[in-house]
Image (spheres, rainbow, N blue to C red):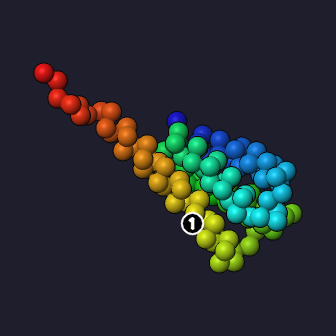
Amino acid sequence: MPSGVGSAIGFAAAIAAAVVAVALGAHQQPLIGLALFSGTTAIVAAVTPLPGAFGAAAHSWAFWDGFVVNRFGELAATPAEIEGLLVLAVTAFIVRSCVVAVGSLDDQDVIPAR
């Protein structure tokens, strides 16, 4: 899947995650929202190249920060919010790296043929 498509899917997934997070009352517990957005980022990162995965992480952060933490779509850059961005970016990187590593194992003969 092209990175741009993955980023677009990440945008749509972040919208859905924002709706669910707000419905669950994540305004009072932003870490619940961050966990939800991390899961969304992980799912998208599993099916798109790394640039698309980072795009999904950026979209997730923008929706988490703008609508769950600060409400009304206002973005801020407090230390806690930057940590949230780092959590999402690291999630995207780790998930994508694991998918690539497992995929490279599939291309190799782990047990030699006789």
Residue positioned 53% across, 39% down in the render: 47
Q: Relative to 25, say whether 19 is above or below.
A: above
Q: Is residue 15 above or below residue 70?
A: above
The outermost residue toward the bottom is 79
Q: Name the residue located 33 percent from the left edge and 39 percent from the top edge.
A: 104
In the picture, residue 3 is in which quadrant?
top right
Q: Which residue is mark 1?
A: 86
Q: Is residue 68 above or below residue 49?
A: below
Image position, residue 36 (x, y; %) = 68, 52
Give the residue at x 23% y 34%: 110
Circle 1 residues within 10 Å: few <14, some 14–19, many ≥20: some
Quadrant placement of the C terminus = top left
In the image, farthest residue toward the top: 114
Q: Is residue 15 visible?
A: no
65 lies left or right of 98: right
User: Total of numbered circles in the picture?
Assistant: 1
Q: Amino acid at mark 1?
A: Leu
Residue 48, percent from left and from top: 52, 42
Which one is nearer the viewer's eye here, 105 or 2? 105
Instruction: Establish if 47 lies above or below 89.
Output: above
Residue 7 in view: yes
Residue 89 appears left or right of 70: left
Residue drawn at (17%, 24%), measured in percent from left and top? 113
Quarter of the figure with residue 75: bottom right
Side of 64 where 10 appears, left or right: left
Q: Position of residue 42 (x, y in %)?
A: 57, 48
What is the quadrant of residue 109 in the picture? top left
Element at badge 1?
helix
